[in-house]
Image: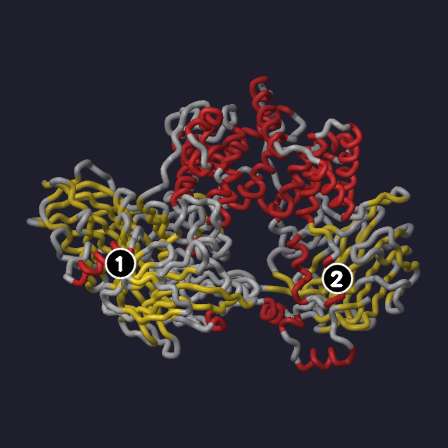
Amino acid sequence: MVTGMLGGMYSLNVMASGELTNSEKLRAQIVSFEEAKVPAWATAKSGKLSMDSRYYINGRQGMRWDWQPGDVLELKLPEPFRVYPRKEASDAYGRNAISLFSAWLHNDQPMDETVRFEFGNGSGTNASFEMKLNFDGWRSPGQGFDRDMSGKPASTMDTVRIIAPNTAKGGTFYIDRLMVSIDDDRRHWSDYHTTTDNKVPEIDFGIPDNVPAATPEQLQDIQKIKTSLQNFYVGRSKLTEKSINKVREDFADTELKREDGVLTGRHVLTGQQVKIYQPKHLDADDKLLVKDYLIFRPYVELMLKIGQIYHKTDDAALKKEMADKFVMMSEHLYNQGFVAGSTLVTSHHWGYSGRDWYTSMFVMEDVLREAGLLDDAYDALMWYSREFKDSFDMELNKKSSNLDYFNTLSRQHLIMVLLEEDPDRRVALLNKFSGFVSGALAQTPTGEYDGLRPDGTAFRHRGNYPGYSFPAFVGMAHVAELLSGTGFELTPAARKNVKNAFMAARNYANPQIGMGISGRRPFKGSNVHGIKEIYRMLAVAGNAETGEPLDAELAATYLRLAELDETASVSLFGEKVMPEAMPQGHWSYNYGAFGVHRFADKMVTLKAFNKYVWSSEIYHNANRYGRYQSHGSAQIIPMGDQPELSRADKGFDENGWDWNRMPGATTIHLPLEKLDSPKKHTLMLRSEETFSGSGNLDNRYGAMGFKLGPVQDLKNIDSSFEMLKSVTAIDNRLVMAGSDISNDTEDHSTETTLFQHAINDRVHELWVNGRLVKDFPFQATLGQGDWLMDGHGNGYLIVSDSKVEVRRQHQKSRHNENKKPTEGDFSVAWVDHGANPDEAGYEYMVVLDATPEKMASLAKQADSGELPYKHEQKRNLHKTFDKATGVSSYVAFSSARPNDDYVVAIGTPSITLLKENGSGLDISVASTDINLTRETHSAPVKVNLTVKGAWKTATEMDNVKAVVKGSRTQLVVTAKDGIPVQFKLTQG
């Protein structure tokens, strides 16, 4: 059967005229052998062909070739394979791609010979490659036609020849599923059988032959670690008849059976290996074939479940049943080609697919050893781990802090160390592992490489990314707990740095993270309750600063998140610890260009982007409309004290969500077809500005500044769009301001969104100027002096002379992944700046604990000119003075001259907060310019300020210099890593 091709002469005419659509080009061309007899277009020169159910990939049979020395199997394809040049393949795919040939070949007898694949038209040969036969079982070559083969492929080729080795005697091959597809060019790795242009070296633990003898204490520590880890993976859940029956059902679904000494079962491959099929574009018949495959990840998860039953049961018969099932599943993996030296075309993102193969092997170590299969599993896992060679080699470098490693394979790496047979080498390996992990967690990697940053952010995909860091935190914390109390524990520097990241996560999650920092998962963002165990794990690993066996601060955070009281802390930690209160205050995370302000049960995520920090992550199938996540957004997430509530419960519901109206953001309101990403694959938009981010004073008061300058000029993205935005956050109130809002878009309005939330049973109220609005639909236009309250209890006072639109309405939208229509009822308000604005602006105040009475009183004060703050906008400067606290914030988008009672001039883009303290001044200065390149660390940035009066620093500081010149003091603040520098000035 030949599928995935257009039929007859029509296909050739279409190809000749170049009229195939991208979808048609991406449709994999598959040759499968499902007929009752050998097809007429398949012939062997001297050997014998037959259909056989002994070994197969597709369906339940493959083609058997009993070959003679030098035999030739020729396939005269009913429809020719189409091969596209790199550029055409890449254009269809949306990023660098190639035309790829892959096939499955089963060999019974390993030999030091090769089989040759040739492609051409008729008797001619245009391209070819060779495959070594040093294996038994299934293998799959994956060769790019114009990258890995000899010769020059034609655009269409109707003949495939497979040439057997010229040995003394013949042999038997099984052949199934030949395919030509378009695939990503990056991840087809050489192995022991075929060569591509991508060679990934194997792992080298680097342990010398002669190592010190292990001490009894070291071996005792290792046994403690091993027992703890095995107990963790066996699990504490009780064994039930239901769980046993579910495992039996899942095992039966594999169709594994042994007949006449031959083990057969359904084809197994990883989720990433499925992608070479381009499944979305397959025709109906091929989709059915591929749908029948077993996916590797649930397959090995089933192996772990079998191992858990094996250890939990005392029933000898059940124990034997589980052992037999586990052995069969292991043997099937080996026969499918999951062995050392076999790439199976591609094995990238291995940790996500393969992590439970390590854990099941670890749990069933004795069973595998008895069956003589342990070495095969160990060697295979070492081979596939090479994707993380920079971590598994345990030699510290800039790539060593990979968050995917800590998420998916750090504990699996420890398993490989613990399974070393030689006790002396085992100790040496564990020492090296501990030192490596300590170094990887303590270091700040250069540039944009993965790892922890000094401000508490954690990098993946060249930016702060909780979607990756939160699961990685689990691996970090668990390794720290496992090694604690032994001679192999992580260093204090490592644990201190990890704690810094964990406490940052505690600050910027309520318990969900804001959409602005959610990457490509705006409605599936991370939730700190889901990883609450990290705080307990790291707490019991000890206080990195004092050396005490318990970190009480981490323990208190765990108790709050776990909703436990101090009584529970005694059994958990061996001492009384009070649960912490909800975090309150303001924190700055300029490696992510965001700040977080918390008051009562609410959290405000203030998000920007710049030259160093991308605005959002958009994939071909994720976050298609997420362009505006970081356009100076200010999402207020309420009800942090109710962890059982979902985002949708709180009104952040994707069904009907208007992607143009990210709360707090200033955007051009586009139709969805224009808001959709202009790139088929990844878009992570940045600007040319180094400014944008957050500053804070005392981790209580804060400000965010966003300067939008030129961005990449892409279709439907207006590169003329400019704005200056600031938010000053003081306790329960936010001052929201924008100026210099300009763009050249004439057919769509520019807006600043106050709020948007779905209307549901919990979130439904809308107050407008003292009236509780129950009408639906509802619309109103408000202006200066008006106020409103959203369903979260946030009040909004309109201070500037602006046109503000308010709606309760039914909205239609699209899903961010599949673009399917969605709809829902929403409450929304926005400032309408009109089309093609020229230096437009706005100002409004948000009250986080609003009541109708409080807002009415505030509006009355405003009407008499008595706002609780004073806000000024000068050239390149937003300045706000809070009357109740005496805090001043200065958001200087470039050099500026406030010339007020305190600050004369600011010479560097920065965010400064200032507060009188008796006869002195408390000052915090933040340069949001993290000043790095992709290959260098953050370099210091000098911020120059001139303040009125003669002042000196209260204590001598290396990074703050004060020089009095007449009636003024010139300050030079050296900032680094975007972290605010706080200091006190006293009169000099």
Residue at 60% x, 32% y is 232
Residue on which disc 2 sits: 288
Query: Secondary structure beneath disc 1?
Result: strand
* Relative to 835, 472 lies left or right: right
Residue 567 image point, x, y percent: 44, 27
Is residue 819 something one can see in this rendering? Answer: yes
Tell us which disc is closer to us: 2 or 1: 1
* Relative to 96, 71 lies left or right: right
Pick out the residue farthest to the left: 966
**From the image, which quarter does the N terminus lie in?**
bottom right
**Foreground residue, 269 or 806?**
806
**Foreground residue, 909 or 716?**
716
Task: Tell me the amino acid under the disc marked 1.
Answer: Met
Residue on which disc 1 sits: 845
Quadrant housing residue 723? bottom left
Disc 2 or 1, which lies upstream in sequence? 2
* Relative to 764, 31 lies left or right: right
Residue 16 image point, x, y percent: 69, 80
Instruction: Tell me the CA gap for discs 2 and 1.
Output: 58 Å
Residue at 87% x, 56% y is 64
**Foreground residue, 11 or 101?**
11
Residue at 25% x, 48% y is 925
Instruction: Count residues near mark 1 (Cα–Cα under 10 Å), then give few for <14, some for 14-19, many for 20+.
Output: many
